Amino acid sequence: MLLEIIPATPADGTELTEIFYAAFGGEFNRKMFPETPDVTVWWEQIFHDSITRSIAGRTNEVFLKVVDSDQDAIVAFAKWKCPTSAGRDRHEPEESAVWAPSCDGKLCDRFFGDLDMLAVHPSHQGRGLASKLLKWGLARADDEGVEVYLSSSPEGKPVYEKYGFRDLESFSPYPDYVQVYLIEL
């Protein structure tokens, strides 16, 4: 099995959406993003448009995917916001998020500042893919001499702690769910 990290393309929106739903299950995530036709189309469009802007150099975001050559399928992905040089901000002005009608908009507004994420399909978890995607971003941050901050689900926190991330603070946007902000030390 050959697992390769390569840039995502706008045409990957459907597969990235499928991985999102598979990786981020549970009551909390389904409250924000129910697996309904309108939310599915919304995610596919978000991925398509965001990757298109990234490729055009209109943002400082980088979308990566991990492809399993045996299955000819995407099995993981990450969206990184890379540092930019002083005086060179490639990040377009933030627009207020417009959530799909079936989303819990208030919960989404409380939880997300940006839709940055790292996701691995459950069938490929435990194979080091999250670590590979994380290392990619950490290497770039080291090259730029910048700190890395992230927000982690309870399931993802142990992966980040392996790489030296430590808690900054936590919050509970939903009953029985704790999200943690981490910094790489």
Image (spheres, rainbow, N blue to C red):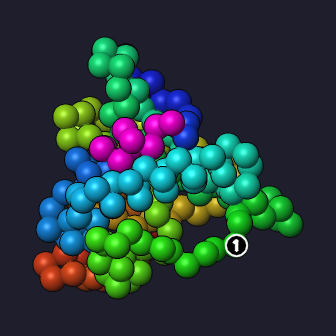
Magenta part of the chain = 11-19
| Residue 181 drawn at (x, y percent) | 39, 73
Residue 72, by quadrant, is: top left
Secondary structure that dominates the magenta span = helix
**Is residue 108 shown left or right of residue 174?**
right
Q: Residue furthest right?
A: 87
Residue 87 vertical placement versus 171 (above, below): above
Residue 96, by quadrant, is: bottom right
Residue 142 vertical placement versus 67 (above, below): below
Residue 148, by quadrant, is: bottom right
| Residue 98 drawn at (x, y percent) | 48, 74
Q: Nearer the viewer, residue 17 or 129?
A: 17
Q: Nearer the viewer, residue 67 or 134?
A: 67
Please state which amino acid type lies under the numbered disc 1. Answer: Pro
Give the residue at x 15% y 82%: 175
| Residue 131 drawn at (x, y percent) | 38, 41
- Per the image, the residue denoted by label 1 is 93
**Is residue 74 shown left or right of residue 80?**
left
Residue 128 visible somewhere in the drawing: yes
Residue 138 visible somewhere in the drawing: no
Q: Quadrant of the N terminus?
A: top left
Residue 2 vertical placement versus 54 (above, below): above
Q: Nearer the viewer, residue 174 or 170?
A: 174
Tell me how many marks there are: 1
**Is residue 74 shown left or right of residue 53?**
left
Helix, strand or loop at disc 1? loop
Give the residue at x 70% y 72%: 93
Give the residue at x 67% y 43%: 55
In reply to whether residue 17 is colored magenta, the answer given is yes
